[in-house]
Image (cartoon, rainbow, N blue to C red):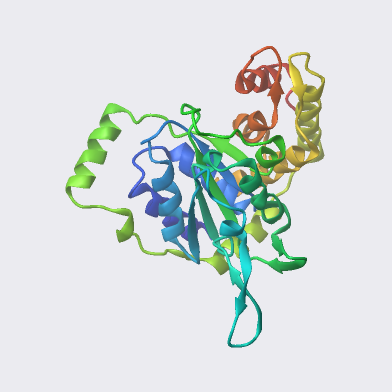
């Protein structure tokens, strides 16, 4: 298992220069059985990271370029009339994949965004009263630009809550940007990546992540953090129970990536801003991440 993880990390590092923490967080979301939201300015590599991950896993990859005129059926699929057979035939949409990239998800209308609500939580799609299971593993990695507000539609709370974690890449350092120029001059492209892990391997890795031990004291620490977010005066809406489960599952996955069969408080502290911040609705114009950081300082560590 360790060899497969190292191969996957190395494969992603061939196209994503630096950003070891970001790569680790995306793998945490993948192995914990959740979904990831990349929020950042244009041109920092959000789509490149998503495509590199899809190329590294031997599974079905689909991409949705979200626009205001995109319809829900463009995602889920629809029934079409087959004149030869004389009956309706289901035409699957791009959601029937192992890795689904929803690029610029906040450019789609709320009606279209809602097409992902069911499949991200229940791993199935219902069209005309018929439910169909999607392939396993199923992983949604979405990108959105927080700067360009014109022509965008903010994701509703229910949609944000379905992303296990949110993260941003940020600008590279001078040395990383120089290395990026050198690699592009050598012709290193994402299309050159070869699969290094199968979809069956991903399911096996997820099983091992679930076996990572979380002590009772650490579970109380997670619970105290979440409940503190609901009781904070500068928070209108705190973290949901889904967020509580997500924090434990990501802590297990991070511990597994670190080569441990037990989670520690440092795992929770590192993940909390990425797992909890996007689930908060702050009051008084405050930002969510400073609130989570304040809670981490105030809640006693076991």
Going 38% across and 54% down the picture, which residue do you hit? 11
Is residue 57 left or right of 236 when viewed as pictured? Answer: left
Name the image quarter holding the C terminus: top right
Q: Which residue is drawn at 79% across and 22% down?
A: 228
Q: Nearer the viewer, residue 200 or 165?
A: 165
Relative vertical location of residue 203 with respect to residue 46 in this rendering, above or below? below
At a point 81% along the width and 27% down the height, the residue shown is: 227
Up-down: is 147 above or below 82?
above
Question: What residue sits 70% from the left and 35% below the top?
Answer: 157
Q: Where is residue 114 in the image (x, y as percent from the top left)?
A: 67, 47
Q: Nearer the viewer, residue 298 or 57?
A: 57
**Number of numbered markers:** 0
Q: In this view, does 42 lie to the left or right of 211?
A: left
For residue 217, say whether it is visible.
yes
Residue 85 percent location from the top left of the image? 62, 87
**In front: 232, or 132?**
132
What percent of the width, then of the height, locates residue 141? 54, 48
Regarding residue 259, the answer to whether it shows in the image is no
**Residue 266, percent across and down?**
63, 32
Q: Which residue lies furthest to the bottom in this view?
A: 84
In the picture, the quarter occupied by the N terminus is bottom right
Q: Which residue lies furthest to the left in this view?
A: 185
Q: Nearer the viewer, residue 294 or 75?
A: 75
């Amino acid at each position: 298992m360790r060899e497969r993880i190292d191969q996957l990390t190395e494969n992603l590092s061939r196209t994503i220069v630096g950003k070891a923490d970001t790569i680790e967080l995306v793998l945490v979301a993948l192995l914990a059985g959740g979904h990831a939201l990349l929020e950042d300015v244009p041109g920092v590599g959000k789509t490149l990271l998503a495509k590199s991950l899809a190329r590294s896993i031997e599974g079905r990859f689909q991409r949705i370029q979200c626009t205001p005129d995109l319809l829900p059926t463009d995602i889920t699929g629809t029934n079409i009339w087959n004149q030869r057979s004389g009956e309706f035939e289901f035409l699957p949409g791009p959601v029937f994949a192992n890795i689904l990239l929803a690029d610029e998800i906040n450019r789609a209308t709320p009606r279209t965004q809602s097409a992902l609500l069911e499949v991200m939580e229940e791993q199935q799609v219902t069209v005309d009263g018929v439910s169909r299971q999607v392939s396993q593993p199923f992983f949604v990695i979405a990108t959105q630009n927080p700067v360009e507000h014109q022509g965008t539609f903010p994701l509703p709370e229910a949609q944000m809550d379905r992303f296990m974690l949110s993260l941003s890449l940020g600008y590279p350092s001078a040395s990383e940007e120089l290395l990026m120029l050198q690699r592009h001059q050598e012709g290193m492209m994402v299309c050159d990546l070869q699969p290094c892990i199968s979809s069956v391997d991903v399911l096996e890795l997820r099983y091992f992540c679930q076996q990572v031990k979380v002590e009772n004291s650490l579970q109380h620490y997670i619970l105290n953090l979440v409940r503190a977010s609901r009781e904070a005066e500068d928070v209108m809406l705190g973290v949901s129970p889904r967020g509580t489960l997500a924090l434990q599952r990501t802590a297990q996955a991070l511990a597994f990536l670190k080569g441990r069969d037990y989670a520690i408080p440092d795992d929770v502290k590192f993940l909390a801003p990425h797992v909890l911040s996007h689930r908060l609705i702050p009051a008084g114009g405050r930002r969510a991440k400073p609130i989570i950081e304040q809670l981490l300082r105030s809640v006693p560590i076991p």
